[in-house]
Image (tube, grey):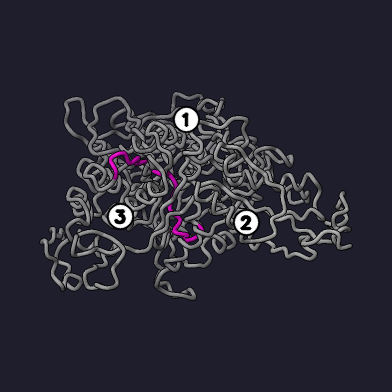
Amino acid sequence: AKLFAESGVIVIASLISPYRADREQVRKIHKEKQLEFMEVFVDIPIGDAEKRDPKGLYKKARAGQIKGFTGLDAPYEPPLDPEIRIKSHEMTLQEEVDTIIRALQARGILTATDHTPTWYPALLPPDGGMDWQPPAYSTYSTAAAVKFPQVLLNDIDLQWVQCIGEGWAAPLKGFMREGVLLQSLHFNSMLTDPLGLTGNADFTERQTNFDDYSTKLQMGERVDMSVPIVLPITAATQKMIEGSKQVTLVSPTGKPVAVLTNPEVYEFRKEEVISRLFGGMDPDHPYIKVLMAAGPYLLGGEVELLERIRYNDGLDSYRLTPAELRERFIQHGADAVYAFQTRNPTHAGHAYLMQDAGRQLKAKGYKKPLLWLTPLGGWTKSDDMPLDVRIHQHQVVIEEGMLPADTVMAIWPSPMLYAGPTEVQWHCKSRRNVGARFFITGRDPAGIKRSKNKNQMTVGGDFYDGNHGRYVLQTSPGLGEMKILSFSKVYYDKLDNKMKPPDKSRKSDFLSISGSTMRALAKKGAPPCPDVIADNWEETKPCIPNGFMVKRGWDLMIEYYQDPKNTKWIGYSRMMSQPLIAQGNFVTKGTFGKPSWSLYFQNSEGDTISPWHDLQLYPTAGAAPAAGRIVNMMVEIPMGRMEKLEVNKEVKYNPIKQDVKKNQPRYYKYGIPFFNYGMLPQTWENPQKKDKDGHMGDGDPLDVMEIGSKQLPTGSVVQVKVLGIFSLIDQGEVDYKIIVINKDIQWHLR
């Protein structure tokens, strides 16, 4: 069997092997050659075996004509943990065959293809089979897509769209329908049928049917899917898309990015999702807060990207699709890829894990194992290190030789959930989908501290035990051919300035350098330590130990931690766009999409002017209100754009600036604006004047909503006809909205 398996043949040895020791010896022989071995237990009562005996051997054995007959006068030691169990007295022949085929598929041994790709077995196949491909780019053009009902995404939603559309979440092809979500929550997996053996090849793409009790649903192949990849929507959105066969998904900047087909809307049972995903409740857990603030419905359906997702933040060159990464691995000639996930800067402790993993693989006989450094690029909590700082620091670490020179670094697009053992299975699965055969894990993957919120059973401390994530990952049933390279915590050895597992015989020589210690040292700009580190270093922490991080990398840490609130940092993958600005005399400053951006107005002589005070309210200077309801509107936010731009009252000349909240850019979040938004020059909502209910103005110019059919650029000055007005009460202040339409539009014919 071993000789045939070495030549790539699948061998079924259909013989009785009664002794465990013999079977384990065969397993060992295969393992030494890195070959899969699967023990099959045909688990049936001996009476049923006798009934099926065509040669009458049992009868002869009972008559004493055959001695040492297994199960009668010779022992049979049943397998303790077989890979496959066949209860043939309860199963049809086809069910037995399907069970074996599914087991072979789950291990990546039997694939849904009639050929073996050249990259296998160096790279593992994605869940769904050798030939599985991510959804093709949509056949709809952007012009066609904007005619469908539009669903506004937030940053996290967009990151999930990228995970789905590029193939990181294979075999999932869209946001989870309710049936798939239930499987993910309760089994950490989903059913799939790549070969169509059960007639359910499109099972995950069908509307969930709770009246389907077919046993065939249980016969599909199960693959890892430990986290809910869902799209929350508001009640207003649910009503808007009702009855639609397609909807268009729109980025936070207003850019159509994908089409979702055959939509399925269902109730978002938040408590169920949170309790199953996190295994507990903490109202101040960052991702739990995200889920609790989301809409009351979930939208499922298959997703087709309109084009490649680009964030335009200067980091797109580090964003490679799974297909591009596979090609990169092949170009390197890798015979195995080992992946390391991180959302922290790389120090010598991380480098030890990655370097030692490479050494282990070479000791196993691999000739060209390739390290894939895969930093998380999606949403993270506000006090995590920004994405751009991490990426540039990783690049420096590679250039300085702390990691292998051929290391492939590429951003992983998923958001961070901080869901401990459940989430780390997703981290592992998505890297396997790209081809990684090995995954490095250390202590407390995807962990987080509990909050100090007293409205919970446990306050403070770790949300998850630091060993649980690693342990669960090692014992996960959905690993397939992937292997886990597991490491315990490493320490800094003062004798040779290296990170390693501690030597218990000389504990005093080892330092524990935590993340909080590293941050504190960077914040105060700690210099390198002398060659001999003082014995009281852990009490005083005056310097950064030599070799803990390369100098250029440490300089980046100092730069960030000494100025963490600087708006130049890129916290995580957030789509940036270019402004749509009217033709005219303008001066822009800063980067669009960041708090630094400003648009200043100039007159024909080049002098800076205020759009609030110097532009005219009426088209004809000095015209009285009685002259008609035609006024000048100055556009701040073009129709369909999400960036919240407004005239700034506090800055000289009142430029249009990006509005911010907690030092972060603000975006319109209540749907796709079907209007151009702006203000009326030389108007003011008087904060000293009260209405009959005691509400005062907010001190801003009058806001205007132009409801024509044409997108108007920022800075446009347009003559509009006043149609009406409504007022809002916002935190005790009156906020008027003037409804207008471009005077050149024959609005009465619309």
Q: Which residues are magenta?
A: 404-422
Name the secondary structure under disc 1.
loop
* Front residue of 229 and 356: 356
Q: How many marks?
A: 3
Task: Tell me where residue 600 appears, x and y as whole percent.
Answer: 23, 35
Main secondary structure type of the part rendered in magenta: loop
Residue 657 picture quarter: top left
| Upstream in sequence: badge 3 or badge 1 | 1
Packing grade of label 3 (10 A; few <14, some 14-19, many >=20) is some
Cβ–Cβ under 8 Å for marks 3 and 1: no
**The residue under label 3 is which amino acid type?**
Tyr
Write down the residue under mark 1: 307
| Upstream in sequence: badge 2 or badge 3 | 2
Q: Which of the image's four quarters has the N terminus?
A: top right
Q: CA distance from mark 2 to mark 3?
A: 37 Å
Q: Which of the image's four quarters has the C terminus?
A: top right
* Front residue of 164 and 430: 430
Q: CA distance from mark 3 to mark 1?
A: 39 Å
Write down the residue under mark 2: 23
Q: Is residue 159 visible?
A: yes
Q: Name which residue lies at 42% across and 36% down.
A: 325
**The residue under label 2 is which amino acid type?**
Arg
Write down the residue under mark 3: 352
**The residue under label 1 is which amino acid type?**
Glu
Name the secondary structure under disc 3.
helix
The disc at residue 367 is: none
